[in-house]
């Protein structure tokens, strides 16, 4: 019907080359080509069908996931896919599965923590999927507080329950298990061990171990394709060499030998995964924004002129809710790219025994994981509301996306707990300024503290807010002043831990300010580089300004209370923001097309590429098993007697 024409018109009016933008979004031409090929491969293979997921019971759903994972593996082998291609294929299958943990945590943990000998033994098995691994760290009683894990690994172990590990409940044959290492009567803290948990012959659980699935999780379908598990050990014995010994060893005599490295390296896999989660936030948010943008261009309500109602995307309120999310998706993409660079850099330094950037890598991955996942979870829900009533239907793709995505705010570190880590890092950075230590990397701006404490914002007219150095300085001033204020208030406490506890809500806000500064700074940095493509850079500049000015608008209290800007300058920022929304409007559909998502991956009738929403929405309703019969099951038991009774009563 009408929808087809609407989107074609939208695409024709865009002011940049969408194919060039696709390359920027993907990161490189090569990355684009791999993603494009893998997404089509999945979309065109009926074995990867997912539109029936919501109608399956948990057991059917899980078995279906096992089938898809096995089929995907068969394809990977048959087509001799590279590691990158295989990763993209799994991504586009779009179903949480044990393989996420095997490839995403078990293998990286082995690679990061194993000795050469251990790598030779375990990696080939894991690479060929002759063993399947999971990551068992969280216990029933302890998740955030890793140091206080109760599981012990001694010659005479106690017993304890693990709780949550994905892939553990039904599939994994091996687990990386976190336990406090005790030898010669001394507790050496948390270490990682490889433990075989199921037989490689018949998949039965090994003696002394009890394992099960922890039960149905949030949402219908959604993350229930994953077998998050509970595991109980009762006096399990493992060979000494299953302690991963790259950084610390236990000798045959039971002597503990610690290499000269920070003990926090045992947390390395969490840093790796948190970095991945930031890129994943841009995937999830862009997907929701793509659905909401296309549908907003198709949907019409009110404002009829010449008998045609207004596209809801033309409402300023719709734009002010949608376009900041579009800008955030791009912002998270670029900060994710930068984080990937930071991670590679820190890894190379660690290999050369340079641990100097480890605290920054930890703070950046923890903080950015926290704010990008929180914004994405909220953003997906906002997109659902932007789609009105149809957004609440599973066929919009949004309810399932939300349910799958929200645990990202909790797993791999609760967001608040992680922001408190950033706050500690900031307070430490400020206190070290006194001793003359020069801050580097993302805290380098603190080195200009005197200037930032005294400077005044130069904005006099709305267009001044398009100046990247003015915007950057406003974010630096706000962040520096919030951190300094926290540090000052902390210094009034005699007991620092007590002070930290007392001030933690303000500390979290200071951490958010610092992380938002990083995102703005990295977006601006990206734009300072070479960005080829007709009109591409211009669009990205607009999105960068929208991200920054919307963030400023949302956190106006911080900017005003720290006297970073005046109320007049805040009002000028709002004026500029409105103008930017109007400039992005004709490009909105093309900007989401640049994500290059197939209809299969989007899984949304509202977000269809062709915009042909209504007939498909209507047809989809008839496919629901509820419509198999016109008269429902239960009519004879529960409806008919009711109606008959009313008839009898009315005759009385
Ligand atoms: C379908 C999936 C979709 C998307 C996912 C996309 C991509 C992911 C890819 C693959 C993964 C696959 C699937 C993902 C799905 C789910 C996976 C979920 C897996 C898990 O959840 S595993 C369990 C994770 N658990 C946690 O994260 C626990 C959180 N807690 C902690 O990390 C720590 O304990 C702490 C950070 C809270 C620290 O607590 P503490 O204060 O007690 O710290 P310490 O005393 O131990 O240390 C203090 C000192 O050390 C510094 N520090 C802390 N952590 C680190 C670190 N990681 N690196 C470096 N330094 C660290 C800290 O700053 C202190 O320093 P200081 O100088 O002394 O102040
Ligand atoms: C879908 C999913 C998959 C998972 N997969 C795995 C897996 O594969 N392997 C694995 O080991 N684990 C896994 N987990 C567990 C996950 O890592 C933990 O749930 C997470 O680290 C949070 O810990 P917690 O549950 O102990 O939360 P808690 O720490 O109990 O948090 C509860 C509340 O307390 C607050 N809080 C806690 N400590 C502090 C503090 N110091 N200051 C202020 N507030 C605080 C938190 O902000 C939160 O509001 C998974 C979890 C989920 C939801």
Image (cartoon, helix red, strand yellow):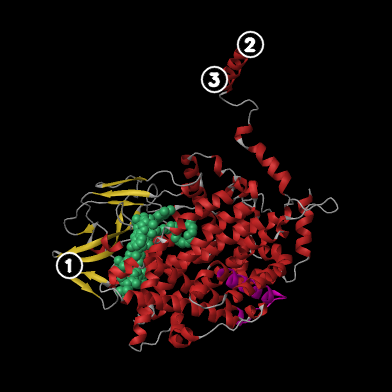
The residue most toward the bottom is 436
Q: Earlier in the sequence, mark 3 or mark 1?
A: 1
In the displayed structure image, the side of residue 138 where residue 517 appears, left or right: right
In the foreground, 256 or 75: 256
Q: For mark 2, what is the residue?
A: 651
Q: Position of residue 137 (x, y in %)?
A: 33, 58
Which disc, if any, is residue 520? none
- Mark 1–mark 2 Cα distance, whole angstroms, equals 92 Å
Q: Which of the two labelled residues, at mark 1 and mark 2, occupies the earlier sequence position?
A: 1
Residue 33 at x, y percent in the picture = 63, 67
Q: Residue 549 in magenta? A: yes
Residue 460 counted in the magenta span: no
Tell me what residue is drawn at x 64 percent, y 49 percent. 388
The magenta stretch is 527-551
Q: Secondary structure at mark 2?
A: helix
Disc 3 crowd rating (10 Å Cα; few below 14, some 14-19, many 20+) is: few
Q: For the residue labelled by badge 1, is the local secondary structure a helix, a strand or a loop?
A: loop
| Residue for badge 3 | 637
The crowd level at tag 1 (other Cα within 10 Å; few <14, some 14-19, many 20+) is few
Q: Are marks 1 and 2 in contact (CB under 8 Å)?
A: no
Asked if one can make out residue 130 in the rendered structure from this viewpoint, the answer is no
Location of mark 1 (residue): 252
């Amino acid at each position: 019907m009408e929808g087809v024409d609407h989107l074609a018109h939208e695409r024709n009016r865009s002011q940049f080359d969408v194919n060039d933008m696709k390359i920027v979004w993907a990161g490189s031409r090569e990355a684009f080509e791999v993603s494009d090929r893998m997404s089509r491969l999945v979309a065109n293979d009926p074995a990867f069908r997912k539109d029936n997921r919501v109608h399956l019971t948990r057991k059917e759903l899980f078995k279906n996931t096992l089938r898809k994972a096995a089929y995907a593996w068969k394809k990977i082998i048959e087509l001799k896919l590279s590691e990158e291609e295989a990763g993209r294929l799994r991504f586009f299958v779009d179903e949480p599965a044990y393989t996420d943990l095997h490839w995403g945590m078990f293998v990286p943990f082995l690679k990061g923590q194993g000795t050469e000998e251990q790598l030779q033994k375990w990696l080939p098995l894991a690479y060929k999927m002759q063993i399947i691994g999971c990551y068992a760290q969280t216990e029933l009683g302890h998740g955030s507080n890793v140091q206080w894990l109760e599981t012990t690994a001694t010659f005479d172990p106690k017993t304890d329950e693990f709780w949550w590990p994905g892939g553990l409940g039904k599939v994994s044959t091996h687990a990386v298990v976190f336990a406090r290492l005790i030898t010669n009567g001394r507790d050496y803290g948390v270490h990682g061990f490889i433990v075989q948990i199921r037989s490689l012959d018949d998949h039965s659980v090994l003696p002394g171990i009890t394992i099960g699935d922890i039960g149905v999780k949030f949402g219908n379908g959604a993350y229930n394709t994953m077998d998050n598990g509970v595991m109980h050990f009762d006096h399990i014995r493992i060979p000494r060499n299953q302690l991963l010994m790259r950084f610390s060893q236990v000798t045959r005599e039971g002597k503990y030998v610690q290499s000269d490295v920070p003990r926090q390296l045992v947390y390395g896999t969490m840093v790796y995964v948190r970095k991945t989660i930031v890129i994943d936030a841009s995937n999830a948010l862009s997907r929701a924004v793509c659905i909401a943008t296309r549908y907003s261009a198709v949907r019409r309500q009110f404002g009829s002129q010449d008998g045609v109602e207004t596209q809801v995307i033309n409402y300023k309120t719709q734009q002010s809710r949608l376009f900041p999310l579009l800008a955030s998706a791009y912002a998270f993409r670029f900060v994710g790219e930068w984080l990937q660079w930071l991670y590679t850099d820190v890894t190379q330094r660690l290999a050369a025994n340079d641990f100097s950037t480890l605290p920054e890598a930890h703070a950046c991955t923890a903080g950015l994981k926290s704010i990008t996942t929180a914004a994405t979870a909220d953003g997906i829900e906002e997109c659902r509301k932007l789609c009105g009533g149809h957004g609440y239907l599973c066929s919009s793709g949004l309810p399932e996306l939300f349910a799958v995505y929200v645990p990202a705010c909790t797993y791999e570190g609760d967001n608040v707990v992680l922001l408190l880590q950033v706050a500690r890092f900031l307070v430490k950075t400020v206190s070290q300024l006194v001793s003359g230590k020069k801050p580097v990397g993302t805290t380098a701006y603190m080195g200009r503290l005197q200037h930032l404490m005294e400077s005044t914002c130069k904005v006099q007219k709305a267009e001044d807010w398009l100046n990247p150095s003015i915007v950057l300085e406003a974010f630096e001033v706000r962040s520096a002043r919030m951190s300094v204020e926290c540090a000052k208030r902390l210094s009034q406490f005699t007991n620092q831990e007590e002070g930290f506890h007392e001030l933690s809500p303000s500390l979290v806000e200071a951490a958010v300010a610092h992380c938002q500064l990083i995102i703005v700074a990295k977006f601006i940095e990206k734009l300072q580089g070479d960005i080829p493509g007709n009109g591409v850079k211009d669009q990205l500049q607009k999105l960068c300004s929208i991200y920054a000015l919307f963030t400023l608008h949302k956190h106006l209290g911080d900017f005003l209370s720290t006297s970073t800007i005046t109320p007049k300058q805040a009002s000028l920022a709002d004026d500029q923001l409105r103008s930017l929304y109007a400039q992005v409007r004709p490009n909105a559909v093309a900007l989401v097309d640049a994500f290059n998502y197939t209809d299969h991956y989007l899984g949304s009738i509202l977000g269809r590429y062709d915009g042909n929403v209504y007939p498909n929405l209507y047809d989809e309703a008839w496919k629901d098993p509820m419509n198999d019969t016109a008269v429902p099951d239960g009519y004879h038991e529960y409806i008919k007697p009711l109606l008959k009774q009313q008839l009898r009563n009315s005759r009385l």
